[in-house]
Image (spheres, grey):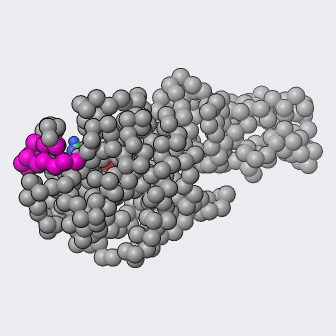
Amino acid sequence: MNTDHWHFSDKVLAILPSMPSSKLDTIIIGAGAAGLMCALTAGQRGRRVLVLERSNKVGKKILMSGGGRCNFTNLHISPERFISANPHFCKSALSRYTQWDFIDLVERHGIEYFEKQTVNGLSGQLFCEESSKQIVAMLLEECRTAGAEVRTQCDIHCVDHTDGFHLETSQGNFSAPSLVVAAGGLSVPSLGGSDFGYQLGRQFGLNLLPVSAGLVPFTLTDSLKELSSSLSGVSCEVIVSNARASFREDLLFTHRGLSGPAVLQLSSYWKPGESVSIDLLPGCDAGEKLKTMKREHPKSLLRTRLGHCLPKQLVARLEILFWRDLAEKPLADWSGRHLETLAGQLQEWTIRPAATEGYRTAEVTLGGVDTRELSSKTMESGTPGLFFIGEVVDVTGHLGGFNFQWAWASGYAAGSAV
Ligand SMILES: Cc1cc2nc3c(=O)[nH]c(=O)nc-3n(C[C@H](O)[C@H](O)[C@H](O)COP(=O)(O)OP(=O)(O)OC[C@H]3O[C@@H](n4cnc5c(N)ncnc54)[C@H](O)[C@@H]3O)c2cc1C
């Protein structure tokens, strides 16, 4: 599909049919992943839909995602890849709109995609070959053919509920018997992150679970910050764990601290003040490996041998940290006890992050609208006609396309019910 003509501005969106507000069936707040999926699904069912978006563009996070290629789903969707106070809640929606349904939609629009390859083989992560703009264009095209209207640059001043939902906005007043809140979470304010969805949850008396930044880099202080800063750009495969979770993926040192997929994943399970453990030699017995090095290369220095398994710059910094006194000793001079101690340090390097980078760079917001307040089949709350979908709900996916799949699936669930 040629996407050049889509500028996602209000001018372009004005070509969508404009409908009299009195005839609306559903108003959707937020034209992100979940809101657009909900709009096109409801529109295809003949519902008269209006989507109100505060920003000047729709789908800003889709556009920025996956380095501009949108990791739009994952081949291995399963409820275990989602974090929620109620781990069963996501099952119904995920099974009624699956990754295969979204892949089918992508294929019908002729969008080419690929599965990301990692050192451990195929990851299941699907990305656009060309551009994430194609996903936004696809969703808008589906909205257009389904007759759903999308308005950008629309500020919602207040939402009232008396015999239907009544919205006062910068573009006039709108009313409908149902309202879908798809305003996302707090992550990345410059891409639309806001607390509006939580405010509405509160206004309607829903329980909200504490929110925190997820899929976010760790910051470090003092000597650890100096270490990571000196290694900025260096990455290697590790296992990062804490008491609740463990991920084997790449770790990236940055100027501020630690990032990379392994760290982003663990950050969603991290609590302030906790330490994390890093295994720098994943999948091998470091004690045995060091003994073999000593046996086979007794005249070598440790840094030379370790430089074959880990980035050399990292080895140089680890040397200062862990075996400064033995740095110039050939392996033959290392005692069994020294090798054992080092094996432990390399496989259980314990680091206490100072904090995370917070909502400024977090890919998701954990917590939010308590799922016990919603129907798992329709996403409707205890207030009839009021629905919550996407990131505003307490369902957060792992890194790798899981969050978009939740947005598509929950959007479809509400779009099928409004
Ligand atoms: C940089 C980045 C990269 C990411 N990459 C991926 C990826 O590759 N794969 C993946 O699965 N997930 C990814 N994510 C996560 C994914 O983007 C979110 O989980 C997903 O967008 C959530 O969809 P949503 O529709 O609930 O919220 P959003 O997509 O955030 O949409 C919410 C919309 O509501 C609008 N809004 C907010 N307040 C108001 C208001 N008061 N009035 C009207 N409109 C309002 C916002 O402007 C926004 O357009 C990424 C996130 C970020 C920040």
Q: Quadrant of residue 76?
A: bottom right
Residue found at x 84% / y 44%: 289
Q: Position of residue 363 (x, y in %)?
A: 42, 45
In the rendered structure, the answer to whether residue 155 lies left or right of residue 191 reads left
Residue found at x 55% / y 48%: 79
Residue found at x 22% / y 48%: 178
Q: In this view of the protein, which residue sits in the foreground, 99 or 284? A: 99
Q: Position of residue 286 (x, y in %)?
A: 80, 40
Q: Is residue 245 above or below residue 113?
A: above
Q: Position of residue 126 (x, y in %)?
A: 50, 63
Q: In this view of the protein, which residue sits in the foreground, 314 or 20? A: 20
Q: Is residue 182 above or below residue 267?
A: below
Q: Is residue 306 visible?
A: yes
Residue 136 colored in magenta in the image: no
In the rendered structure, the answer to whether residue 130 lies left or right of residue 9 reads right
Q: In this view of the protein, which residue sits in the foreground, 201 or 170? A: 201
The single residue placed furthest to the top in the displayed view is 273
Q: Position of residue 410 (x, y in %)?
A: 39, 51
How many numbered discs? 0
Q: Quadrant of residue 336?
A: top right
Q: Range of the magenta residues?
A: 164-178
Q: Is residue 89 above or below residue 61?
A: above
Q: Is residue 143 visible?
A: no
Residue 167 colored in magenta in the image: yes
Residue found at x 84% / y 32%: 340
Quadrant for the N terminus in the image: bottom left
In the rendered structure, the answer to whether residue 222 lies left or right of residue 247 reads left
What secondary structure prevails in the magenta region?
strand
